[in-house]
Amino acid sequence: MRLSLALGATLTSLFVGAALLSFIWTPYGITGVNIAARLHSPDMSNLLGTDHFGRDLLSMIMVGARTSIAVALIAVGLGMGLGVPLGLTAAARAGGWLDEIVMRGNDLIFAFPSLVIAILITAVFGPGAVNAIIAIGIFNIPVFARLTRGGALSLWQRDFILAARVAGKSAARISVEHILPNLANLLIVQGTIQFSLGILAEAGLSYVGLGAQPPIPSWGRMLADAQTMVAIAPHVAVIPGMAIVLMVLGLNLLGDGLRDALDPRLRGRKP
Amino acid sequence: MLRYALSRLTSLAISLAVASVVIFLVVEVAPGDPASYMLGINAQPDTLAALRSELGLDVPKITRYFNWVTGMLAGDFGMSYTYRTPVSQMISDRLWVSLPLALYALGLAVLIAFPAGVLAAARRGKTSDISVMAATQLGIALPNFWFAMLLVLFFAINLRWFSAGGFPGWSYFPSAIKALTLPAVALALPQAAILTRVLRSALLDTLHEDYIRTARAKGLTRRQTLWRHALRNALIPVLTIIGLQFSFLLAGAIIIEQVFYLPGLGRLVFQSISQRDLIVVESVVMLLVFAVILVNFLVDLAYAAVDPRLRSRA
């Protein structure tokens, strides 16, 4: 569906753009405290209102987008960086001991409730953005390893791979030069989905105080701060949540749209 | 069937053993000594040593691991460092909040997802299908703790139908259920969205099968085919997802408990983390992992019950 691709790309680039813009410009500073202007509802001077310290919510959302995107993106990178080579190796030596270890290890990680282990990791090693990245990233490894292995296994049966083997290419070279490019679409689509899950996970971790630490703004942290004020200033709780929903929705739509656009077999088929 | 069950049982035991080693190692490398944390910075070395030996912290790590595991097998989770009460008792008090909450949410999710998924599949491409799918997109993007805050804002603060948090205990039965209702709805809705999508696509897959055409050809109506033949066969992927969702719900309950100030396992974990009560953290996490692995095992067995084809395969 073209609509979901367009809508997803718009929403995603809106947030990425806001995050990038926040490096050079935000409407207001995010560390200044202005008690006189606290908990203002949205108006012309503060488009999204202010929080309990009188900080501009639009500026906070922009800088918060930076935190969310950075944590989720690096976590996906970590999962892909380790998961894809593991999956490729496992498929190249299908049935071997390495394959067995990779697949059993994957089963094990899948058996853990991911958020519980994320909480355990950040709790034991201390809260902070880096530990949040590791905690989210670990659960991305088996996702990409499994996906890559599955895709690669079926590719290994194809004639063009046989041709490459006959030409004398090593398994490693075939994996990198022929298998990987053919899996790129699959990985991009899954990457988008994991990215959106990462945004949700980061929000959850920082909501319980285990993500990025103050004064670095993060959407989950903003929601945690807003919780006690929800009765007197609902906008403080509504706006950061809307940001999370729109960002995740945008990424999911982008993922759906990319899958349809990149896979010619799905084109013209009804959803 | 027996061979199938035995092979699943073996993998259950291996998963549990590996999980216990991983959890023990992660918690063991944690910086900070519980004994010195409890006694403060002015503790005398001999008091510290005495407490360490009382807590069993002075024996080699490998012995401690085996003490911990064998204790758990006997239902003894050790003593809390902070409260000096048995961990098993602390956990069982809290479990009776978290477990009912997760099950309540799972029940709600299934109740919402089944009609929605069947409706969407039966009216594929029509307005009702498109609206159900749009709603699920929104549901998947919804962080459950934020949704929980909105529920509080609307139903507790504005309408005053429910209280904003807290738990009266099971001796006040109707109010206990009422206190768990908003948290369960908050947990259930995003999961219901996922389940609806899975059910819809599983149904659409089975609707292409030959036996569906046969059923239609022998004169069954579309509705009869859908309920009698397609739904039964679509249950396998749906069961997998329900099993997986149970772990999300237990973990999600930990965060939702923070929103509603519910005295469940989540609050126990966070409290224990800040007090470096590692034995409680270890035991709660192990219990949650055990629950998830057990549920997945039961799902595997349920497959065999639903799908006779799996019974012969080991």
Image (cartoon, coloured by chain):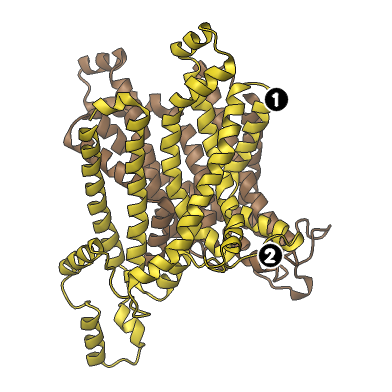
Chain colours: A brown, B yellow
Identify whether B280 is placed above or below B158: below
Question: Is residue B55 shown left or right of residue A255?
Answer: left
Nearer to the camera, A193 or B211? B211
Q: Using the rendered view, name the quadrant where residue A181 is placed.
A: top left
Quarter of the image with the N terminus of chain B is top left
| Circle 2 SS class | loop
* Residue at the spot 29% in from the left edge and 68% down from the top edge: B77
Residue on which the image places disc 2: A29
Identify whether A136 is placed above or below B165: above
The total number of labels drawn is 2
Please say if the residues under marks 1 and 2 sit with CB atoms less than 8 Å apart. no
Q: Using the rendered view, name the quadrant where residue A31 is placed.
A: bottom right
* Residue at the spot 22% in from the left edge and 53% down from the top edge: B17
| Circle 1 SS class | helix
Numbered mark located on residue B307 in the image: none
| Residue type indicated by callout 2 | Gly
Q: Position of residue B36 (x, y in %)?
A: 31, 83
Residue on which the image places disc 1: B127
Q: Position of residue A250 (x, y in %)?
A: 61, 39
Chain containing the residue with disc 1: B
Q: Residue furthest right?
A: A44
Q: Is any atom of residue A58 visible in this view?
A: no
Question: Is residue B10 shown left or right of residue B137?
Answer: left
| Residue type indicated by callout 1 | Thr
Q: Position of residue B118 (x, y in %)?
A: 57, 28
* Residue at the spot 29% in from the left edge and 59% down from the top edge: B23
Quarter of the image with the C terminus of chain B is top left
Other residues around mark 2 within 10 Å, as few (<14) / some (14–19) / many (≥20):
few
Q: Position of residue A108 (x, y in %)?
A: 30, 46
Chain containing the residue with disc 2: A
How far apart in space, not on screen, are marks 1 and 2 (Cα)?
A: 46 Å
Q: Is label 1 or label 2 in front?
A: 1
